[in-house]
Image (tube, rainbow, N blue to C red):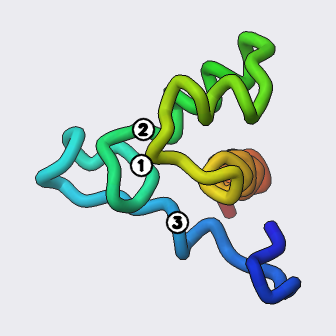
Amino acid sequence: MIDNNGEQASWRQRIVSTPDVLGGKPRVDGTRIPVALILGYLAAGSSRDEIIIEFPDLAPADIAACLDYARDLAEYQVV
């Protein structure tokens, strides 16, 4: 994900998980919107603009962070 300065940004700046909110499920920082919900909308074919209309508290970078988070999980290897 590219931040406002044109530099590579990490999903870790936008995705958080705390035990006291949503039972520790990963969510977009500052919201109660779980990453899995956004990924579900994307999997169902919703566009970024449609998701932002549905969840006006989100920014396009939040959606990109959800995808980056999912990518990192998919690349995780158990050794």
Find the distance from the CA under tag 2 to the CA under tag 3: 12 Å
Instruction: Give the residue furthest to the left.
Output: 20
The one nearer the camera, 33 or 78, is 33
Q: Label 1 sits on what residue type?
A: Pro
Label 3 sits on residue:
14
- Percent x, y for residue 16? 40, 62
Label 2 sits on residue:
34
Label 1 sits on residue:
26
Which comes sooner in the sequence, label 3 or label 1? 3
Please report contact status of discs 2 and 1: CB closer than 8 Å, yes or no: yes
Q: Residue at x 18, y 54 (%)?
A: 19
- Percent x, y for residue 29? 40, 60
- Percent x, y for residue 30? 33, 59
Helix or strand or loop: what does disc 1 sit on? loop
* In front: label 2 or label 1: 2
Q: Label 2 sits on what residue type?
A: Pro
Q: Label 3 sits on what residue type?
A: Arg
Find the distance from the CA under tag 3 to the CA under tag 1: 10 Å
Residue 16 visible here: yes
User: Which quadrant is the C terminus positioned in?
Assistant: bottom right
